[in-house]
Image: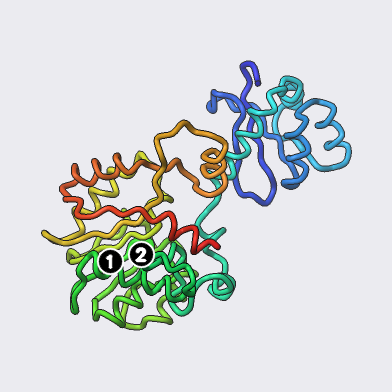
Amino acid sequence: GVRGLTCSFRIEGLGGTFIVGKNQQALSCTIVFDGLLSFCVFAVSPCLMTFAKLYIDGHVEGEGDWFEIAKIVNQLSDKQGVVERLLDFFASTQSVETHYGWSAEAFGWFLDHPYMQYTCGRLENNDDQISLEEAQLNKLELIARWIKVKHGQRHLDIGCGWGGLVQYFSERHGTVSHGVTLSQEQASFARLQELSAQFFVTGFEDYKPSESYDVITVVGMLEHLPVNRHAEFFQYLAATIREHGRVYLQYITRTTRPIGDRTRFLNHYVFTHELNTLANLVELANKAGFEVACVEEGHTDYAFTTR
């Protein structure tokens, strides 16, 4: 919507900017809104009159050349473009700590006890009358069966959340387990629940273990990684697991159907990145040297858990 001009928008309290215009090197000014509400008022009707009213009422300021600001605002007629950029902005600035920085007590209101699983439980024989706790125990034991976990094995849980899977493996199967998370809040809680395990606050790419692992679990973590980094992730798994080791990966795939409103909603509000397809994941696993031993669809388990 802006012909030859580049401007950044900043919303106070959201900790970042997003840019209107293609040439980011030619940034000429910044428009600063005092909050999300004032920006939304402008995004609905991005014209000079709306901007002027917000300015008079003290809800917007400008940084840089005001003549450039006036030119940009006067040319912002592409409402859809502004709103889409706003959505992209939210997706890119949502940090792990914004969400997972909530206390364990807050998550405890809707997660199972004691394992605090933040992914779907598991229905056995389509029995949807069981409790959330029973469904999550079913899921944890299913993972243990699939990767054939044994006493004394070294186990790594990437994206370990509140540490429930690590706790379960350590208590029930006698593993030597480590968990990796980006959330300090989660790691602190997990350390209190399972004193024999170790938890590290770091990205997977920066975690360099001194020994390889017998089994690795990745449950609901890969959705947070852009698709263009999935090959890197599978290479990391291959480098981190011992020969003949086993990996359990739980991931929400996208279909190959044309992108509709439901998919756009998921991309903007649920996942910060586009999802991959099952076919692509299998191909990436094979290229990294893995043999895909089993694949199972679990969308009914997600529906049950959400309900």
Q: Are marks 1 and 2 in contact (CB under 8 Å)?
A: yes
Residue located at (33% from left, 59% from top): 218
In the image: residue 198, left or right of residue 101: left
Indicate the secondary structure of the residue bearing disc 2.
Answer: strand
The earlier-in-sequence mark between 1 and 2 is 1
Quarter of the picture holding the N terminus: top right
Point out residue 223 in the picture as x, y percentages from the top left corner. 41, 50
Quarter of the picture holding the C terminus: bottom right
The quarter of the picture where residue 22 lies is: top right
Point out residue 123 in the picture as x, y percentages from the top left corner. 40, 66
Indicate the secondary structure of the residue bearing disc 1.
Answer: strand
Out of 251 and 47, give the one closest to the viewer.
Answer: 251
- Give the residue number, with chain letter if any, for mark 2: 180
Q: Amino acid at mark 1?
A: Leu
Out of 294 and 270, give the one closest to the viewer.
Answer: 294
On screen, residue 125 above or below 25: below
- Give the residue number, with chain letter if any, for mark 1: 156
The quarter of the picture where residue 146 lies is: bottom left
Residue located at (51% from left, 42% from top): 267
- Label 2 CA crowd tier, 10 Å (few <14, some 14–19, many 20+): many
Out of 42 and 21, give the one closest to the viewer.
Answer: 42
In the image: residue 1, left or right of residue 158: right
Residue located at (87% from left, 34% from top): 53
Label 1 vs label 2, nearer the camera = 1
